[in-house]
Image (spheres, rainbow, N blue to C red):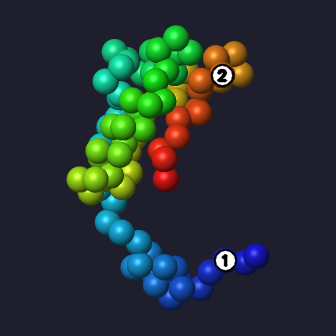
Amino acid sequence: MGRWPREEIQQWYGRQPWLCGFNYLPRTAINWIELWQADSFNAPAIDEELGWAEAVGFNTLRTSTRSCGPMTPPACGHASTGS
C-alpha cells in the first residue's frame, strides 16, 4: 500500500467531521490514576457519560493513559463506548 496522492488526501479530509472534543475524566474518578484502577473503574458510568457527550455533538475526547502498563489491573483500556 503506497502513499495516497495529495488530491485524494484532501478529498478524504474534506469528508471528515469537524473535531469537537473535551478533556475527559469520569464522575467516578477523582484523578486519572483512579480512572484505571480495577476497584474504581466503572464502565457503565463511562458509557453513560460518553453517550451524553455524543448526544450533544462531541466526537472526540482526550484522557490520560499514563498509568496503563504491563503491571496494570485488567480494567485498563477495556471501556466500551457502546458504538
Residue 2, quarter of picture: bottom right
- Which residue is farthest top? 39
On the picture, is 38 further left or further right than 19? Answer: right
Q: Report the quarter where the N terminus lies.
A: bottom right
Q: Position of residue 83 (x, y in %)?
A: 49, 53
Q: Is residue 21 above or below residue 23?
A: below
Secondary structure under tag 2 reads loop
| Residue at left offset 29%, top offset 44% | 52
Amino acid type, callout 1: Arg
Discs 2, 1 touching: Cβ within 8 Å: no
| Residue at left offset 32%, top offset 66% | 18
| Residue at left offset 35%, top offset 28% | 26
Q: Which residue is mark 2?
A: 74
On the picture, is 28 further left or further right than 43? Answer: left
Amino acid type, callout 2: Pro
Mark 2, other Cα within 10 Å: few <14 / some 14–19 / many ≥20: few
| Residue at left offset 23%, top offset 53% | 56
Q: Position of residue 11 (x, y in %)?
A: 46, 84
On the picture, is 72 further left or further right than 15? Answer: right
Q: CA–CA distance between discs 2 and 1? A: 37 Å
* Frontmost residue, 15 versus 66: 15
| Circle 2 or circle 1, nearest the eye | 2
Q: Which residue is mark 1?
A: 3
Secondary structure under tag 1 reads loop
Confirm whether residue 51 shows in the render. yes
